[in-house]
Image: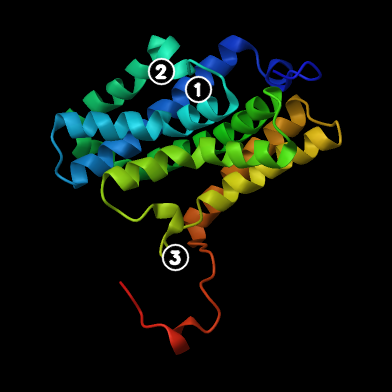
Amino acid sequence: MSENVKVLQQLFSPSLLHALDLIGIFVFAISGALLAVRKNLDVFGIAVLAEATALGGGLFRDVVIGAVPPAAFTDLGYFVTPLLAVVLVFFLHPHVERIQNAVNFFDAAGLGLFCVVGTAKAYDYGLGLTASACLGLVTAVGGGVLRDVLANEVPSLLRWDRDLYAVPAMVGATMVALCIRFDVLNAFTSTLAVITAFVLRLLALRYHWRAPRAWQRRSTVREEE
């Protein structure tokens, strides 16, 4: 781990970071469990998708930076929290579906938090700024990609007909990297990065912002649904 700056220690107390992690993990797990229900999977399939969505991005980051064993395997709370989401969705999924807007709201908050925490943690373990920002992005969206792959779907962040998801996380992670570069990363700027990613995601949901497709695509490539 880098001896120069322990970014996470400067930004968050361990208890606060742990609590925020668990909240984000719970909301991500709900999205995985809901997709499993839509795919008509059994309770084991629901649990697998919930765990993968909640923990996939963080596990990948920790393995890459050498933070082993990952927190998901050393803290029982990280493993149990997605199972609580499984129980909730298994018995109450029609009601959970009806509060999808609330789920999207907290999912956006988790996206903002995880892209910031992931970037800071990667930098703490000695990665450069670009690599740290990339791992911040992976921390935020990696679980969703794994969820979609396991469910045999094209990952949502790669589909043109889905509202922007990776871009807000990319912006948040880049803001953290730039703040580190110019030595202005603190509680205020890190919170600003979280809020920026969060608000961008909410705006994308509200106004259906999507990334552009290939220029003059229709003139040369047949539409594929």
Residue identifier under label 1? 21
Residue identifier under label 2? 78
Q: Which mark is residue 160?
A: 3
In the figure, residue 9 lies in which quadrant?
top right
Q: Which mark is residue 114?
A: none
Q: Which residue: 39% across, 30% down? A: 54
Residue 58: give x, y in percent of width and height.
49, 29
> Does label 2 or label 3 sit earlier along the sequence?
2
Q: Amino acid at mark 3?
A: Trp
Q: Amino acid at mark 1?
A: Asp
Disc 2 to disc 3, C-alpha distance? 32 Å
Disc 1 to disc 3, C-alpha distance? 29 Å
Residue 152: give x, y in percent of width and height.
26, 50
Instruction: Tell me whether circle 1 and circle 3 mark residues in contact (CB < 8 Å).
Output: no
Residue 126: give x, y in percent of width and height.
71, 26
In the figure, residue 75 lies in which quadrant?
top left
- In the rendered structure, the answer to whether residue 47 lies left or right of residue 180 reads left
Q: Nearer the viewer, residue 161 or 106?
A: 161
> Does label 1 or label 3 sit earlier along the sequence?
1
Q: In the picture shown, does residue 115 fall above or below 208? A: above
Instruction: Tell me whether circle 2 and circle 3 mark residues in contact (CB < 8 Å).
Output: no
- In the rendered structure, the answer to whether residue 125 lies left or right of residue 98 reads right
Q: Mark 2, residues whose alpha carbon is within 10 Å: few (<14), some, or many (≥20)?
A: many
Q: Mark 1, residues whose alpha carbon is within 10 Å: few (<14), some, or many (≥20)?
A: some
Q: Which residue: 35% across, 18% down? A: 79
Q: Under tag 2, what secondary structure?
A: helix
Q: Under tag 1, what secondary structure?
A: helix
Q: In the picture shown, does residue 152 fall above or below 59? A: below
